Image: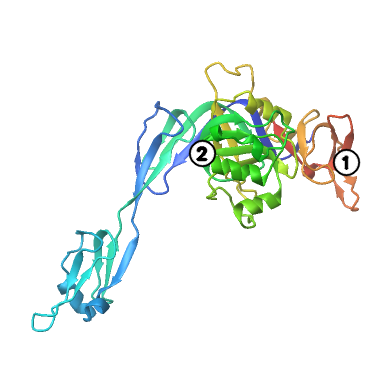
Amino acid sequence: MAKAYTPGLKVSARTTHRTRRLLPIPGEVKVAVGDVVAANDVVAETFMDGDITPMNMANRLSCSAGDVAGLMLKQIGEPVKEGEPIARSKGIFGAFKTEVAADADGTLEQVSSVTGQVMIRGAAIPVQVRAYLSGTVVEVLPKEGCIIENDVMFVQGIFGIGGETEGVIQVACSGHEETLDADAITADMKDAVILGGARMTAAALRKAIEVGAAAVVSGGLDDQDLKELLGRDLGVAITGSETIGITVIVTEGFGDIAMAARTWRLLADRAGRVASVNGATQIRAGVMRPEILVPLEAGENENEVDPTLAREAGLLELGTTVRVIRDPYFGLLGEVSALPAEPAVLGSGSRARVLEVRFPGGDTAVVPRANVELIEG
């Protein structure tokens, strides 16, 4: 019998998760296989070349490019300080000499006899990669990084902004259907991962930034609030590099949408625990979803089975939980109650494979299979 598949977001009470921590250029790996690391530990480090400061020395000394090297007071490879004399003209009959001071701190890297330019290289820029997820190092990639593994509670969102962060989960809403507004954000939420309910307002996000929260996770977000927060329309490329001072994850979609009850309960039950959060999202080729990871304690949720081990990833079956991602049922969760084998004629006149969804209230709807996503776990 043929099988049906659809993309889905994973929500799991327990799964074994691995994260790759890699440097952008070769460097030094600071951990070994078997090491236990915390989320904020540095696991690899390298140094990138500092910025170049060019100086038109021939022009400043009023000499030819070929004469610059002979007028330098510092040699290539020597350190220089901003304001320190690094070149001096011969003057007229030994008098009226002109000195030129360095425009920046760094190392004298190049003196060109062709252009008369002097290049000062700034101090090397350290690049550190942190563990992000607390756990055990299971593999070391020489000069590149490592792979860290742990058993976690794992929640994927549908959209996010902002990069990797971590903090203690604090619950701001009393339930998964409650709007997250500014009044729910308090000063003691500094460095916390704030758990909302339904839509998070622009005022709430501004307050979270003001108090210094690490992240906000809630069910929905209005696209106009997002534009107001960023100060621009968001493009279709990958997110995660935004510098607004906070990471934001939307678990369900845009608009006034409540967080799935199971997702909210999984997160709320772990209030006071440290969560690793990443808002990076990419919806085109190489799909990347925002995520919340909560490391589990020994024996915690051992009766929970990773759903990806129980069935094929993305497999649609009767009873599978799905979210409708197109109007008129956008954002609603339900269970697959029928999987007709033959294509059906849609309202537009086109033919497509469909499924029947039963919503919590008992109502059912027939929707194209392309208009749902799987809620794994």
- What coloring was used for the rendering? rainbow
Image quadrant holding the C terminus, namely: top right
Hey, which residue is sitting farthest left in the picture? 93
Horizontal relation, residue 149 to residue 107: left or right: right
Helix, strand or loop status at disc 2: strand
Name the one closer to the observer, 115 or 182. Answer: 182
The residue pinned by badge 1 equals 342
Hey, which residue is sitting farthest bottom in the picture? 92
Determine which quarter of the picture holds residue 341: top right
Horizontal relation, residue 172 to residue 343: left or right: left
- Give the number of the disc on residue 165: 2
Q: Is residue 252 above or below residue 52?
A: above
Q: Is residue 207 above or below residue 303?
A: below
Does the rendering let one see residue 157?
Answer: no
Type of residue at label 2? Thr
Type of residue at label 1? Glu
